[in-house]
Amino acid sequence: MKKIFSFLAILAVVFTFSNLTNAEPESDVTSVIDSAWDQFGLFSSQIDETDSTIWIEMDKSKSEQELRKYLKENLPQTDLNKYKIEIITRDLEEVKNEHERSLGL
């Protein structure tokens, strides 16, 4: 019984280590957008590799120009050259109401 437990413990450690080393690192684009979420009132974001577009939906009471400036200063130049950035601004109350309707409230 002790041998089976030891074998299972070793197998779990090897499997966990294997998954950690094979995990893809978070992209610069993802980490930059994640860090802007609260500061710029983002509602959603999507990175479309097929169309090379970053889609961002944000609170219209926040500054789109400041968000663009932030992205330009924090994204690597290679990503700025690769992706087109599309920003949609929406009213916070409109988004809340839409969310409540989707939940059936």
Image (tube, rainbow, N blue to C red):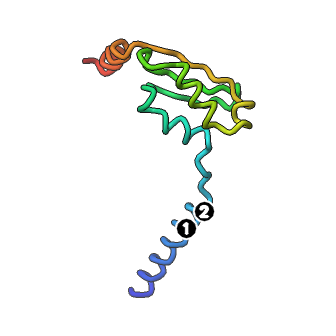
Q: Is residue 27 left or right of residue 37?
A: right
- Mark 1 crowd level (few <14, some 14–19, many ≥20, 10 Å Cα): few
User: Which quadrant, please, contains the N terminus?
Assistant: bottom left
Cα–Cα gap, marks 2 and 1: 6 Å
**Tag 1: residue type?**
Phe
Q: Is residue 14 above or below residue 48?
A: below
Q: Say which element carries label 1.
A: helix
What residue would you read off at disc 1?
A: 17
Residue 65 x %, y % = 55, 19
Q: Is residue 15 above or below residue 101?
A: below
For this orientation, the residue located farthest to the bottom is 2
Q: Are marks 2 and 1 in contact (CB under 8 Å)?
A: yes
Determine which quarter of the picture holds residue 2: bottom left
Total numbered labels: 2
Q: Determine the residue positioned at 33% across, 18% down.
A: 96
Q: Determine the residue positioned at 61% across, 51% down.
A: 25
Q: Is residue 39 left or right of residue 64?
A: left
Q: Which mark is residue 21?
A: 2
Determine which quarter of the picture holds residue 37: top left
Residue 70 x %, y % = 56, 30
